[in-house]
Amino acid sequence: MAIVKMKRLRLMLVRSQKEELLRELTRLGCVQVTALEEELQEQESQGLVHRESSELTALKTRHAALERSLELLRRYAPEKKPLLSAKPELESEALLETDGLEEALALAAQLDAREDRIRRIGAEESRQRSLIESLMPWVSLDLPLETEGTERCAVVLGSLSLRIPLDQVEKKLAETAEEAELFPVSLDGSQQYLLLLVSKDQLAAAQECLRGFGFSAASLSGCTGTARDGVSAAETSLLALGKEKAALVKEIAAEGPRREKLQLAADRLATRIAMAETEEKLYGTGSAVVLEGWIPAEKEEELSKLLERFTCAWETSEPTEDEYPQVPVKLKNNKFSNALNMVTDMYSLPAYGSVDANPVMAPFFILFYGLMMADMGYGIIMIAAALVAMKKIRPRGGTLAFCQLLLYAGVSTFVMGALTGSLFGNAPEVIAGMFGSQWKGLPALFSPVKDSTLVLYGAMALGVIHLNVGMIVSFLEKKRAGNLMDGVFEEGPLWVILLGGVLLALDMLGLVKSQALHYAGLAILILGGVMLLYGAGRHAKGFGKVTAAFGVIYSTLTGWFGDILSYSRIMALMLAGGVVAQVFNTIAAMPSENGVTVFSGIIFLLIFLVGHALNFGLNLLGCFVHDLRLQCLEFFGKFYQDGGKRFEPLEIHSKYAVPKEE
């Protein structure tokens, strides 16, 4: 339940064993290789060493081809799988092999060629449809489209807007070109299609005249025969293209049973790409290669046994504090705190050498979520969803953390719902009332609707506890780092002030009447204030002590007031969720005010299901966002050091299968 201790690894290996070492490191999955450019830049410029090369580009090209082929199968032959299903588990050796790659790549090339032909068929179909559309206005014209006229007479096909009167055009044309005449061919919703016969001597004048009316010559170049013949030929072509396309689609779909081979090949190539990327981080000479990276200290013995099989020299060393920013971070948590990994991943990993927040954050995050949601019905749904998902898909990594968080938050939601007597809001009470019962619903320790003030005070009290836990962690971290006095004068004064305030509150509220207690509380409060002012200015000089004092007073008063007030959102979301649930229950029960009937029962069920589905969905997201805010802003602000770099070891990369856990 902490940040895993890392060690720097340096290794020199004979070149002939490079491929085998990378393969075994991939199988081991615990070494992150880092680049060595800065350390070996001078030697490289002198030609003493060179950066290793690999087939990375070629591997990525092949992998992309396999992914395209799988996308084609998803499109043309969708895989029928259960809604929730686990990825197949394979031995590590199966994912590191290269058998069957060439066969899979050949299949991918065939599928890609068929898809390319389908795309070209689609383009040709569009062209033929456009041709039919352009020919349809002229199908009634029994004239070859390539006809341009006779020796003295020109033939022009074109169109005019339907809004322009044809007789007006004909009159103007007759005045301009005596040997010209327009013949209507067809009409559609917006255009009138015309044939112009004109003497070639008067063609230019006729065209100029018609252009003034917006006459547009038809673009039918390349068309031969009549329009009817052209449409018939295009329809025949479309029919043939459609048959060819259907056959190609059928051929692609027929390769569906070979999907798993393509998936296995894609996973194998993905792993080889990871190995190639690592290889390009290495430097070497003609006979040896150099590797540098990081390894978890707990895996050093396992690595040592592996390296005994190789001809190499290697060493590990503890990182210095100056190297901490470069050390990758790996978190090690138990099943409970592992659920919060997704929260720290969304925020930022802790810096190496600092503290892992998950163990101390987990109980608060889960408690706050349950308080905000606070409904037994919603909790049961969350628990059931998490258990089903964990059983069906056997999640790992981030997906496992999400399922665990959903499970624990569901349990917390159920418990808090039991304490508030909430089961889908006040559904039991409303349903009983529909049948004439005077039952007042499930028993409750407190109600967010009736006891909202109490819930508000409780939420802020939890906030004080939450913030103080963060301060305790900060104090312990400063003590561990040898900065005990920083903790005494930064966190210590706030605890002293808090103690004094509690003692004064006990006396002022009449809970404990004692003059001695009053003066003791006042003295402790003053002592805390003095410690706060001294701590703020103990590293400052001159007038800086005054500005530091004013600064710490302002930041303490406003900061703590704002932080504690932020926890009122716990009450707000608990109240909002409960009220919305009750509103939907009331609306659903309205048709049954005069008695329950089949119709009113159906209406109740529909409104109940839809209303609570909406309320559940909104609260599921809203509670997570506000809970996340309390952790990331209020809690983390007290001690958390972010900026850690994720530990990314050389390991098997797979998308469609997962390696069996050893």
Image (cartoon, rainbow, N blue to C red):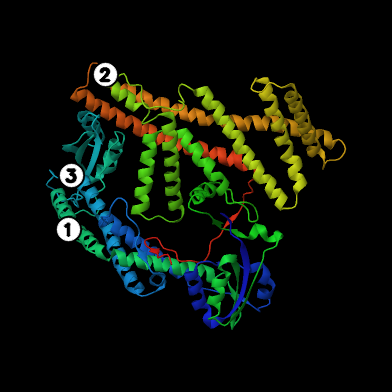
Q: Is residue 585 left or right of residue 410?
A: left
Q: Nearer the viewer, residue 354 or 450?
A: 450
Place residue 629 in its image quadrant. top right
- Mark 2 near mark 3, Cβ–Cβ under 8 Å? no
Q: Quadrant of the C terminus?
A: bottom left
| Structural distance between the alpha carbons of marks 1 and 2 | 68 Å
Q: Nearer the viewer, mark 1 or mark 2?
A: 2
The kind of residue on which mark 2 rests is: Gly
Disc 1/disc 3 C-alpha distance (Å): 24 Å
- Disc number for residue 243: 1
Dot 1 lies on which element?
helix
x, y percent for residue 207: 28, 40
State left or right for residue 493 relative to residue 455. right
Residue 467: percent from left, percent from top? 62, 38
Q: Which quadrant of the view contains residue 418?
A: top left
From what the image shows, is residue 473 above or below residue 584?
below
Question: Would you say the residues marked 1 and 3 are in contact, meaning their CB atoms lie under 8 Å apart?
Answer: no
Q: Residue at x 66, y 79 (%)?
A: 48
Label 2 crowd bin: few (<14), some (14–19), many (20+), radius 10 Å: few
Task: Left or right? Give the position of 291 relative to 152.
Answer: right
Residue 296 visible within the image: no
Q: Amino acid at mark 3?
A: Met
| Image coords of residue 160 (percent x, y) | 25, 36
Tag count? 3
1 and 2 marks in contact (CB < 8 Å): no
Task: Give the residue at mark 3.
Answer: 136
Residue at which label 2 appears: 436
Residue 649, position as x, y percentages in the image:
53, 64
Nearer the observer, 633 or 510: 510
For label 3, the SS is helix
Q: Residue flagged by tag 1: what amino acid is it?
A: Lys
Mark 1 and mark 2 lie on one chain; the one further toward the N terminus is: 1
